[in-house]
Amino acid sequence: MKMHLDEKIWLILSFGMIMGMMLFTGYQTFVLGMGPPSHMETIDPQQVDETAPFNEPGITQVGEDEYEVIMTLELFSFNPGDIEIPAGSTVHFTMTSKDVTHGFQVTGTNLNAMVMPGHIQKISQTFNEPGEYLVLCNEYCGVGHQHMSTTITVN
Ligand code: CUA
């Protein structure tokens, strides 16, 4: 097979670019240890109700303008739902699923997390603007998926 020189150059260039990107991604993953933080902590999804802190889901004030929310997600609800907090609060969410993979997306914010059974998901957000924020499950989880929602009210 006869190949033009410029064809060879392009082949070598594109192959080199792919190799470069794969090496860079591998370096980030294995040398720098970059990756989704949600896989760090695990839990037995069958024992969520008996495992602290998920045996007591709810909102706790942990500091001035700082709250902790322990939340379980299941078909098709968020527990606790209808969260109310004062404006300016920083909320630390600790979440897990009791059954299948759910989503936790809060409209009007950058909050968007995947909540998987067997894994503990942690994410924080400061709510400065008063209003009612819609919380949605954005991972298809079954026939009631479209009804899986709640609100966070910032006063
Ligand atoms: Cu939970 Cu969709």
Image (cartoon, grey):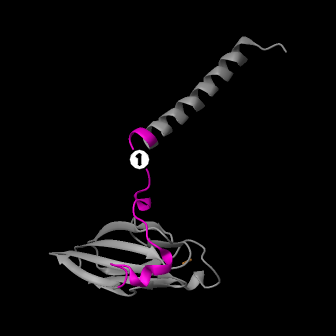
Q: Residue at left 44%, top 78%? A: 135
User: What x and y, as percent, mark residue 136?
Assistant: 49, 77
Residue 8 falls inside the magenta stretch = no
Can residue 95 be seen at all in this image of the molecule? yes
**Residue 36 vertical placement versus 92 (above, below):** above
Q: Residue at left 51%, top 76%? A: 137
Q: Nearer the viewer, residue 65 or 133?
A: 65
Query: Is 119 displayed left or right of 19 in the figure?
Result: left
Query: Is 80 displayed left or right of 4 in the figure?
Result: left
User: What x and y, as percent, mark residue 29?
Assistant: 45, 43
Among the 4 quarters of the image, the one containing residue 19: top right
Q: Nearer the viewer, residue 119 or 8?
A: 119
Identity, as a three-letter code, of the amino acid under mark 1: Met
In which quadrant is the N terminus drawn?
top right
In which quadrant is the C terminus drawn?
bottom left
Residue holding disc 1: 34
Residue at the farthest left position: 64
Residue at the farthest right position: 1
Can residue 86 be seen at all in this image of the molecule? no
**Residue 127 vertical placement versus 34 (above, below):** below
User: What x and y, as percent, mark residue 68?
Assistant: 27, 76
Q: Secondary structure at mark 1?
A: loop
Residue 33 falls inside the magenta stretch = yes
Q: Within the displayed image, which quadrant is ligand 1 positioned in?
A: bottom right
- Report the magenta residues as a range: 30-55
